[in-house]
Amino acid sequence: MFLLLRTRRQSVKLFKSKRSAGLMASPYIAWAIIFIVVPLCMVFYYGLTSADGGFTFDNIATIMKPGYIKALKRSIVLAIISTLVCFLLSYPLGMILASMKLKKNAYIVTLFILPMWMNFLLRTLTWMTLLEGKGVINTILEFLHLPTLNIINTNGAIVLGMVYNFLPFMILPIYNALNRIDENVINAARDLGAGTVQTFLRITLPLSMPGILSGITMVFIPALTTFAISTMLGGSKILLIGNIIEQEFTQLYDWHLGSGLSIVLMIFIILNMIIENLSDNGGNN
């Protein structure tokens, strides 16, 4: 009898805890439905229908037209280059920060996050001011009688803007992954005769792979979908797929075509996440 009463009390407590947890989570669930689920449903509705409301794949198939496929290829290439540059800059920096044991000096990490506290458009506008023909950089070069740079309105300027804006998203996951590696594992590998390169390739790199994959995703996806950076640093002369989608919504008011092209980008994002998940599971196995 005592056991039955005790089990019943535990069941009641569990029910109450689940109910209270559900009530506490309800605002977040409502927020997700209103700002994530509903917009996604709208994108799929407009992307898979024509102006008269009929079902069609024409909006998605438009991506195969020469102008659109060229913009998509350029977006993918620039996103890959930006992600690669961010990785090459972030991994050595992450190793340096991890080796410094920043428990008492965490403000050093904050310095790399600090630019993120400024508005995204303001950061990009700053680079626009620095890189333009009569900008700060060229003014200094002219004063020093050095050749000026004509980088504004080029692919290089767009990549520079992407790297500057998205670099912290690569640094933080890589630093966290490297910081979690147990020093005893590395010391054990060295005690067993592994050299610096061998220890890095067999211990450090595999153990930091989750951070690398997370950083790649966090940089590649916004780099692929960006339009503000290419508009400001590309001078609207270099169109990425994000620029075309933005123009379809804000200038041409063709929500059906804009949504169809957005679905194409979603497919690339989903594929990137699947590849990351498979790579992560493969590394864990």
Image: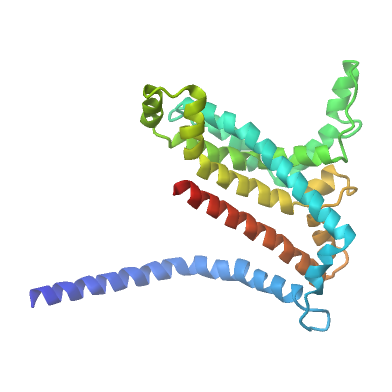
| Residue farthest top in this picture | 144
Q: Is residue 242 above or below residue 258?
A: above
Q: Is residue 178 above or below residue 264?
A: above
| Residue farthest front in this picture | 193
Is 22 positioned to the left or the right of 229 in the image?
Answer: left
Q: Between 259 and 12, which is closer to the camera in this rendering?
A: 259
What kind of colouring is applied to the model shown? rainbow
Is 198 positioned to the left or the right of 270 in the image?
Answer: left
Is 245 positioned to the left or the right of 104 in the image?
Answer: right
Location of residue 39 in the rendering, given as x and y in whole percent from the top left corner = 67, 69
| Residue farthest left in this picture | 1
- Number of numbered markers: 0
Location of residue 47 in the rendering, given as x and y in whole percent from the top left corner = 75, 72
The image quarter in which residue 12 lies: bottom left
Location of residue 110 in the rendering, given as x and y in whole percent from the top left corner = 55, 34
Q: Is residue 242 above or below residue 173?
A: below
Location of residue 84 in the rendering, given as x and y in whole percent from the top left corner = 68, 39
Please tell me which residue is depicted at 66% across the width and 37% down the height of the picture.
86
* Quarter of the N terminus within the rendering: bottom left
Asked whether the viewer can see residue 98, the reply is no
Please tell me which residue is depicted at 48% across the width and 33% down the height of the picture.
202
The image quarter in which residue 264 lies: bottom right
Please tell me which residue is depicted at 63% across the width and 60% down the height of the picture.
270
The image quarter in which residue 120 lies: top right
Is 71 positioned to the left or the right of 112 in the image?
Answer: right
